[in-house]
Image (cartoon, grey):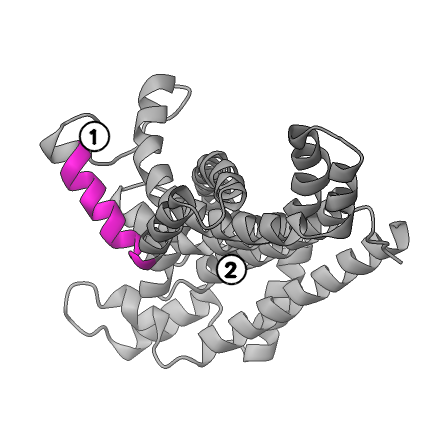
């Protein structure tokens, strides 16, 4: 077990290194000069000597391999560099915004599990009946609607028409916990609509497959109550693939909440990435993608370990 964990962690770190290297090279090979972009904000082209001075200050005059070595060395020391835009340490900005994105993802995941898993089990137990067909149709519709459309419709309905919640924004939890949760509800629910549908479909499929297994028929033949069979034998064995879907979806959301954060003005990491890309802020883009990649890979490792706990048949050699 420990050998497996160490092996997976090593592979994960190698993947992070590869992703970071690719991102560094791609960003630096894209046409355009960040120094020129910074200096031409007033619509007037700066003098060449001014641009050269800015490039030296930003370290862009060095060979690309020297920049790469400096970047990797800084990461190993916990230094993600300094923003080209405001000279603030990138690590501080990431540390400020990352918890907000993680909070949004966790809230959306909790809502999705509470909705998707019970309804998926219900649909499987009512297979072929009206309840099953209705829930399956609803899940298909929820998956087919883009998240930005869902978010916009929710703003129009609940914020502008009914005026139950604000259209968007952010209040720190330490300042006003109630307002913080109110602002969190709408973006989390927007993500949960599609997320819960994916969980529902996977839960329904795996429960249906598990109900056909020999051990389930054996448990019923022994006279075990139906609720015990479902809880102990069906649900537990069916949750492995569901956990995989949840883990992959959460990893995707780490960098995929851009539209939701934009629609609801949620100051998370994904929206920060968009601004960094638009301004060609190399340190910010590299730091954000490094953090997202690391969390995504570690999350998948955690899912693999949980899979082995949920399904004892799996042996990690």
The percent position of residue 30, horizontal first and vertical second, equals 40, 79
Which residue is nearer to you in this view: 57 or 188?
Answer: 188
Q: Is residue 67 left or right of residue 137?
A: right
**Dot 1: few (<14), some (14–19), or many (≥20) neighbours within 10 Å?**
some
Residue in the image at 48% along x and 44% along y? 123
The reply to whether residue 305 is visible in this rendering is yes
Q: Most prominent secondary structure in the magenta stretch?
A: helix
Q: Which residues are magenta?
A: 144-158
Q: Residue at x 35, y 25 (%)?
A: 180
Q: Nearer the viewer, residue 153 or 295?
A: 153
Image spot of residue 179 (x, y percent): 31, 21
Image quarter hosting the C terminus: bottom right
Indicate which disc residue 105 carries.
none
CA gap between label 1 and label 2 equals 31 Å
Residue, disc 1: 166
Label 2 Cα neighbours within 10 Å, binned few <14 / some 14-19 / many ≥20: many
- Occupied quadrant, residue 296: bottom right
Helix, strand or loop status at disc 2: helix
How many labels, in total? 2
Among the 4 quarters of the image, the one containing residue 57: bottom left
**Is 304 contained in the magenta span?**
no
Numbered mark located on residue 289 in the image: 2
Q: Between tags 1 and 2, which lies in front? A: 1
Q: Is residue 81 visible?
A: no
Residue at x-position 57% and y-position 58%: 293
């Amino acid at each position: 077990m420990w050998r497996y964990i160490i092996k997976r962690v090593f592979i994960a770190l190698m993947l992070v290194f590869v992703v970071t290297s690719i991102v560094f090279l791609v960003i630096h090979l894209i046409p355009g000069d960040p120094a020129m972009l910074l200096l031409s904000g007033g619509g007037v082209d700066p003098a060449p000597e001014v641009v050269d001075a800015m490039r030296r200050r930003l370290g862009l005059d060095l060979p690309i391999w020297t920049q790469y070595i400096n970047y990797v060395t800084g990461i190993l020391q916990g230094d993600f560099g300094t923003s080209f835009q405001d000279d603030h340490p990138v690590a501080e900005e990431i540390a400020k915004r990352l918890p907000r994105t993680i909070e949004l993802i966790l809230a959306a995941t909790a809502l999705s599990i509470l909705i998707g898993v019970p309804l998926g089990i219900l649909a499987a137990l009512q297979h072929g009946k009206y309840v099953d067909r209705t829930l399956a149709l609803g899940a298909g519709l929820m998956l087919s609607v883009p998240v930005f459309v869902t978010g916009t419709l929710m703003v129009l309905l609940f914020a502008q028409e009914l005026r139950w919640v604000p259209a968007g924004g952010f209040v720190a939890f330490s300042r006003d916990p109630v307002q913080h949760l109110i602002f969190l509800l709408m973006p989390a629910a927007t993500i949960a609509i599609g997320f819960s549908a994916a969980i529902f479909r996977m839960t329904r499929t795996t429960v249906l497959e598990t109900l056909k297994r020999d051990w389930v028929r054996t448990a019923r033949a022994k006279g075990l109550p139906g609720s015990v069979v479902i809880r102990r034998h069906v649900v537990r064995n069916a949750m492995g693939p569901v956990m995989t879907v949840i883990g992959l979806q959460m990893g995707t959301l780490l960098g995929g909440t851009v539209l939701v954060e934009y629609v609801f003005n949620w100051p998370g990491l994904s929206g920060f990435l968009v601004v960094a890309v638009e301004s060609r802020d190399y340190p910010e883009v590299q730091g954000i993608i490094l953090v997202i990649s690391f969390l995504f890979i570690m999350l998948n490792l955690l899912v693999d370990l949980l899979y082995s706990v949920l399904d004892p048949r799996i042996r990690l050699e």
